[in-house]
Amino acid sequence: MLDAYTATGKSIGDLLGESLKGQIVVPEFQRGYSWAKKHVEAFWKDIIRFKNESQAPGGPDNHFLGPIVLMDDPGKPITYLLDGQQRLATATILFSVLRNLAKSLQTTEGDVFAHETQIRYITKEDYGYSLELGDLDREFFKARIQSDSEKVAKDTLRSHRAILKARDVLLASVRTVLPADPAAALKELTTLRTIVRRDLKMAVIPVKSPRDAFRIFETLNDRGLKLSVPDLLLNYLMGAAKDNSERTSVRKYWDGMMEGMGKKDIHDFLRHVWISQYGDLKNVDLFTALKNNIEEKKINSLDFALACSEECNAYLTLLRASKEELGNAAKPIGSLVKELGFDVTLPLLLSAYGLGLTQMELEKIARLLLIFVIRYSVLQGSDPSGMETLFYSLARDIRKEPKAKVPSFVKKALEKKLPGNQQIEALKLDSDAFVLEQEQAVYMMSRVANYMQSKTKELGLHESNLEHVFPKNPSDAWKNTENLKPYLWHLGNLTMLGKRLNGSAANAGYEEKRAYYEKNTELKITQQLAKEHASWDVAAIHKRTQDLLPTILKIWDFKNPSYV
């Protein structure tokens, strides 16, 4: 049985320098470089914080970067890096930045420093580069980072762009601490190199096989040191794969998903796929649920990766919400997941899309969902957990229904929980029920403006702008500011304008704004506001909310969902 306490402390210099014989190699099944700007900035801030604290009396001797999992190859001078790629790759990028900045000093001492950095921590005599990344990034990393003279290599992958971004962030960061004098700058570069090579420590956990590594990842996860579900799942699939050929194929499908998802969170995708098939997670975490399902059903790693890849393509189609792919269903789906950010609807949409419904059927379901979320969550302000429970159970249940009956099945289930007109009309006007988020406000007011403007010609969103009657930064002309502040995002305080007001006009008192509304806008929603309200106070906001409600309830109505 593995003993987690066999870990030993090693510095970056121990790992990348000559004390470790051979190369550290990232296995082919590992994902590419993925640290974003925020991760690299945090890495740099840790270095600077340690530098400052270590110089004070009683300061720390080193900074702990976390555990790293290594596996020796018994037949080759190679140590496989099973966990810790991001940290070692970023440390190597920083060494390359220190090297390049030393060269730019154009002094003999700077050239010596650059050469020493290259041969001690970026390359190893007889072995090549100290760190060798996986298939996705290996050649790019060598050409653009590790090579003593940067070579041409196109950044064709997201991981390549992340590598360049990390280099740019670290280059800019180091420059901010360098003095103008070359000798003083070299001294600072030397201090930074010493910290990186000597004082940044990691707990090295040696394993004998990828399966052992997986058990360690699982144990760390169980003990609260949460690792990412995608990384855990990929490592599990690789460990369970029957041979290198299968591992290569799993890696290929996984890389395709990572590249397709871009900056979107693949964890959310995996969670939504699970929910769409099995309903909400209960008393178990996502990784354990996925792992148990794979093992109980004896699903082959490659088959699982292929199924994930196909689901990912469907998921991305929904996220893009393009008319070319979804036809008329694109508009309501785009409103749900792009305009309003109701990701809670994605598992149900994923199930519906996966069943092969027609675009018309998919459009109908998306419009019903739009009406439901506006009435239930936006207008009524009900607890979102109830909506989640309903949507997640529906996502699972429609997979058991005959395809032709799915739209009516969804409608009946939603109708049971749908707030009716009387429920919404009975809501207190000074409650939180009619206070909107920005995305909700833009979506709702533009739809109301379109409905009031014309029954046939829709007003383009780009032609109109959300307007707060009582503004975000009110001028001194507003004498009731404290009373109106809570109503800034209230439904009754919002309207639309064809042209955004400039700062002074936007913040002007109501009399001036009303005159502008009457003279300059062609939008009926705002013309009507100016005509019917000679002053603007809490009572006016309540009255306008009541006046808008009949229109709102007509637009978001199950009996005629075409308006959304």
Image (cartoon, rainbow, N blue to C red):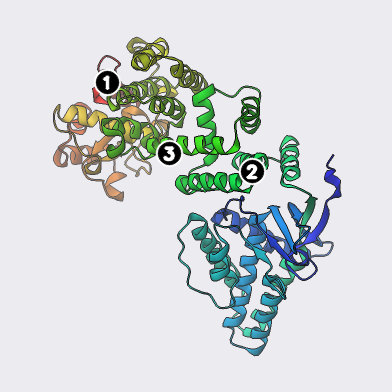
**Quadrant of the image for the N terminus?**
top right
Residue 493: in sight, yes or no? yes
Q: Is residue 139 positioned above or below 457 on the image?
A: below
In this orientation, which residue lies closer to the viewer: 290 or 112?
290
Tell me the distance, in whole angstroms, between the alpha carbons under discs 3 and 2: 22 Å
Task: Name the kind of residue labelled 1 in the image.
Answer: Pro
Tell me the distance, in whole angstroms, between the alpha carbons under discs 1 and 3: 28 Å
In this orientation, which residue lies closer to the viewer: 24 or 270?
24
Task: Name the kind of residue labelled 3 in the image.
Answer: Asn
Q: Are marks 1 and 2 in contact (CB under 8 Å)?
A: no
Mark carried by residue 561: 1
Q: Are marks 3 and 2 in contact (CB under 8 Å)?
A: no
Label 1 residue SS: helix
Q: Earlier along the polypeptide chain: callout 1 or callout 2? A: 2
* Residue at image point 38% right, 41% down: 472
Location of mark 3 (residue): 313
* Residue at image point 43% right, 18% down: 398
Mark carried by residue 238: 2
Mark carried by residue 401: none
Discs 1/2, front? 2
Q: Is residue 402 positioned above or below 479 on the image?
A: above
303 with respect to 530 (left or right): right
**Quadrant of the image for the C terminus?**
top left
Q: Is residue 560 positioned above or below 109 on the image?
A: above
* Residue at image point 58% right, 72% down: 175
Give how far across and how far down residue 492 sits, in percent.
Answer: 32, 27
Label 2 residue SS: helix
Give how far across and how far down residue 218 sits, in percent.
Answer: 72, 38
298 with respect to 450 (left or right): right
The quadrant where residue 65 appears = bottom right
Question: What is the crowding at mark 2: few (fewer than 14 residues within 10 Å), some, or many (at least 20)?
Answer: many
Question: What is the crowding at mark 3: few (fewer than 14 residues within 10 Å), some, or many (at least 20)?
Answer: some
